[in-house]
Amino acid sequence: PLQNYEKKMKAANPDWNKRDDNSWKARQNKINEYAGSKKRYEVTTGKQDDGSKVKQTETKAANNTVKTKTVIKDPEGNKDKNVEHRDKDGNIVKQKTVKKTVEGTEKLKTKYDEDGNLIRVRGYVTGDKEKRQKAKDEKKRLKEEAKGNRKKKRQDRKNEK
């Protein structure tokens, strides 16, 4: 989808620069998040060239973390929300992603330990069966990864004693 967006924007304007496009930056931040990359682009909020709206807020949360919330709403009515809690070193502590489309909603909450390893996954999906099954499979895979990380952490603590 991001490549399609880039092609569409280049076709409309050959001088288009993705690094100056907030919609591209916000979408790329989501891709980087899913890929495990810590690279994030600074996003300017407001109405974008492609008709979508981007809103980003940063606040201090309880437990000395910084909460960054990014909402991208496109003209078709689809909405992507990403909430990240980062500690003072910039590591992701908690993360919540919500995708609302015309077909349904997908919500996934993930929690990380101090080393950046996934330790907990929660969430749900509404909508058609095929989409639900894909999301369930992904959630199951993430839960197995989290379980393995918790087990490894317990084993490491046990070996330290």
Image: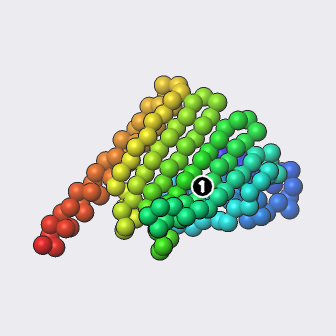
- Asked whether the viewer can see residue 38, the reply is yes
Question: How many numbered discs sit on the rendered protein?
Answer: 1
Q: Would you identify the image quadrant in which residue 159 lies?
A: bottom left
Residue 13, horizontal then vertical, whole percent: 87, 55
27 to the left or right of 9: left
Q: How is the image coloured?
A: rainbow
Residue 30, horizontal then vertical, whole percent: 58, 54
69 to the left or right of 17: left
Residue 13 or residue 33, whichever sits in front: 33
Other-residue count near label 1 (Cα within 10 Å), few / some / many at <14 / 14–19 / ≥20: some
Residue 15, horizontal then vertical, whole percent: 86, 62
Residue 31, horizontal then vertical, whole percent: 57, 55
Q: Can you say which quadrant of the picture contains the C terminus?
A: bottom left
Q: Residue at x 51, y 61 (%)?
A: 61
Q: Amino acid at mark 1?
A: Lys
Q: Which residue is mark 1?
A: 69
Q: Residue at x 50, y 71 (%)?
A: 90
